Amino acid sequence: MSLNKKNLVSLTPVKTIKSLYKLLNFYFMAVLKPFKGLRPPKEIAKDLASRPYDVLNSDEAREEAAGNEYSLLHIIKPEIDLPHEIDIHSQQVYEKAKENFDMFRAKGYLIADFEKYFYIYAQTMNGKTQYGVVGCAAVEDYLNDIIKKHELTRPDKEEDRMKHVRITNANMEPVFFSYPAKKEIDEIVAQVVVSHEPEYDFVADDGVGHHFWVIRDREINEKIEKLFTEVPYFYVADGHHRTAAAALVGNEKKKNNPNHRGDEEYNFFLAVLFPDDQLTIIDYNRVVKDLNTQSVEGFLQKLEDVFVVEPKGKDAYKPNRLHNFGMYLEGKWYSLTARAGTYNDNDPIGVLDVTILSQKVLDEILGIKDLRRSDRIDFVGGIRGLGELERRVDSGEMKVAFALYPVSMKQLIDIADTGNIMPPKTTWFEPKLRSGLVVHLLN
């Protein structure tokens, strides 16, 4: 049935509404496709798999890949194979990425599967395992907001990853998505996991376990693909810049192809999708260099107008509920509890603790207006612990640290569903996906 004025006018009002509902569900549904993955042989998978490109700098990447010719860092951080002084955004770096990628394929470090498959990627951390489906999401879904975002992206970071995708003609690293949990998908994943040995199964140096299955059964692949058409939306959890870059390059290729059909591989990009009820967001904390010319006493007095301030001594204080913060200042910890009227629990952005801290403390008291560009503030992932906040302050590098209560998946989804954007550096997902277990070619 096509959507046109003639056939809608001929229907009764009730039938019209039902027809529109069906059509909207048809035209606006999430897409996840199987694909022919490019994967490492079992015996080198642990050595080849690496942390994502954006969680370590060039020096850290050089150290991590030292003596390991298999590491994917040679492709996703190719500056490690060039002189230290090189500009990491120079054309030579991107060309090195392509050279190394071609070399990996020639040496058999990455080998193509013969058929299109879905894959299962599970991670185990602190005794908890989360199970994701690996497939290819649709570029059109990103452009049409079927894939929902909760963070702004920076054009310079987008362009960096776009150049990398263009020159390798591949999605070297997956993006991390979530979706509303669906029982039937959970059951298929569980069935595959208990009935098949994993293709890869190893514990990385950070203690996180990684488990990977190839779904070779065509009927199961077809079931998974069909079930995902019943999922209304996907949510970007981690990897907003990689997602944007993959989608924008795919759209470029579409525009540059006069014979575009819509089923070419460039119309899709690599993603791992986890059900929302398996994911945990951890805290993302802040450290600030100065008190904006104020004395400690004056700063604490201003905080009293916004928070109930309770000294906690030298023992680290971790926030235990929404609207409660930990603060470390001059060797002492404080509990800060936001006073009524300083937040709006009916506003998906106003309810966030990062909003309260950003508006009431960082902006109004400390004078930090632009969190993205200010050099007076830094952000510390909760995976590093509260000891990292103490270290940054005790060293004299920073003056004060704030520990936040983590955002929930419900809050993230509420914000994405309402078209809102979270303040910078709000969510930290852990464990991070390993890159290199499977690669998606765009040709």
Image: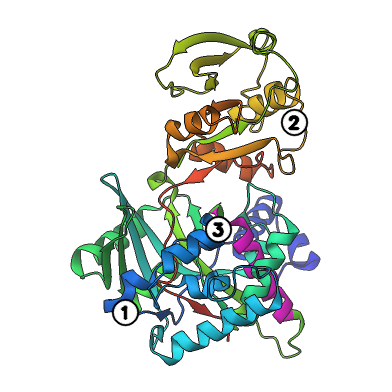
Labels in figure, total? 3
Are dots 3 and 2 in contact, CB under 8 Å?
A: no
Residue 267 shows in this picture: yes
Name the residue: 69% across, 13% down.
295
- What residue sits right under mark 2 in the picture? 368
Disc 2/disc 1 C-alpha distance (Å): 53 Å
Disc 3/disc 1 C-alpha distance (Å): 37 Å
Amino acid type assigned to the residue bearing label 2 in the image: Ile
User: Which of the marked residues, 3 or 2, is nearer the chain's N terminus?
Assistant: 3
Amino acid type assigned to the residue bearing label 1 in the image: Arg
Name the residue: 44% across, 31% down.
386
Prevailing secondary structure of the magenta residues:
helix
- What residue sits right under mark 1 in the picture? 216
The image quarter containing residue 346 is: top right
Q: Which residues are magenta?
A: 238-254
- What residue sits right under mark 3 in the picture? 57
Where residue 67 sits: x, y (%)? 38, 73
Where residue 420 sits: x, y (%)? 69, 42
402 displayed left or right of 289: left
